[in-house]
């Protein structure tokens, strides 16, 4: 999407993959994604090509965010579970498994 005009350009309509969340690393230009099930991947922002980083996470990550100061991705499920994700290796670490929202 062009931020000035709002024009949308389809870079790859044939990914055959659901994308639930995206996070961008501004320092490297890398775009990371999660499909809301068990896949964590990198998306080429120019071509739309998708490369799996970890496709068996068994954690159902629904949303992700990139911390530019640490280079770590953070993910969350819809059930109060939080993770850190290493974009280089695909390793996922539990941060908090609490269900207490108070």
Image (cartoon, rainbow, N blue to C red):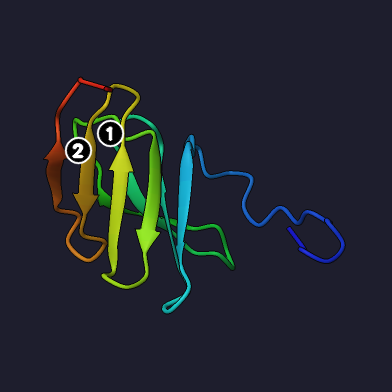
| Residues packed near mark 2 inside 10 Å, few (<14), some (14 to 19) or many (20 plus) | some
* Helix, strand or loop for disc 1: loop
Q: Residue at x 31, y 37 (%)?
A: 76
Image: 34 above or below 38:
below
Q: Which mark is residue 101?
A: none
Image: 36 above or below 42:
above
* Helix, strand or loop for disc 2: loop
Q: Which mark is residue 38?
A: 1
Point out the tag, 1 or 2, that comes first from the N-terminus. Answer: 1
Image: 67 above or below 57:
below
Locate the C terminus by quadrant.
top left
Q: In this rendered view, identify the residue nearer to me: 36 or 11.
A: 36
Per the image, the residue denoted by label 2 is 57
Image: 23 above or below 3:
above
**Quadrant assignment, res 27:** bottom left
Q: x, y (%) of residue 69?
A: 32, 73
Q: x, y (%) of residue 43?
A: 46, 58
Labelled pair 1, 2 in contact (Cβ < 8 Å): yes
Q: Residue at x 14, y 29 (%)?
A: 97
Q: Is residue 46 left or right of residue 22?
A: right
Q: Residue at x 42, y 49 (%)?
A: 33
**Quadrant assignment, res 56:** top left
Q: x, y (%) of residue 100?
A: 20, 20
Q: In this rendered view, identify the residue nearer to me: 9 or 13.
A: 9
């Amino acid at each position: 999407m062009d931020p000035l005009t709002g024009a949308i350009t389809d870079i790859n309509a044939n990914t055959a993959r659901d994308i639930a969340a995206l996070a961008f690393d501004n320092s490297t230009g890398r775009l990371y994604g999660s499909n809301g099930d068990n896949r964590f991947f990198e998306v080429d922002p120019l071509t739309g090509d998708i490369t799996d980083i970890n496709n068996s996470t068994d954690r159902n990550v629904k949303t992700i965010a990139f911390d530019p100061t640490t280079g770590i991705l953070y993910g969350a499920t819809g059930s109060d579970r939080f993770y850190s994700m290493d974009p280089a290796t695909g390793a996922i670490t539990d941060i908090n498994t609490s269900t207490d929202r108070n």
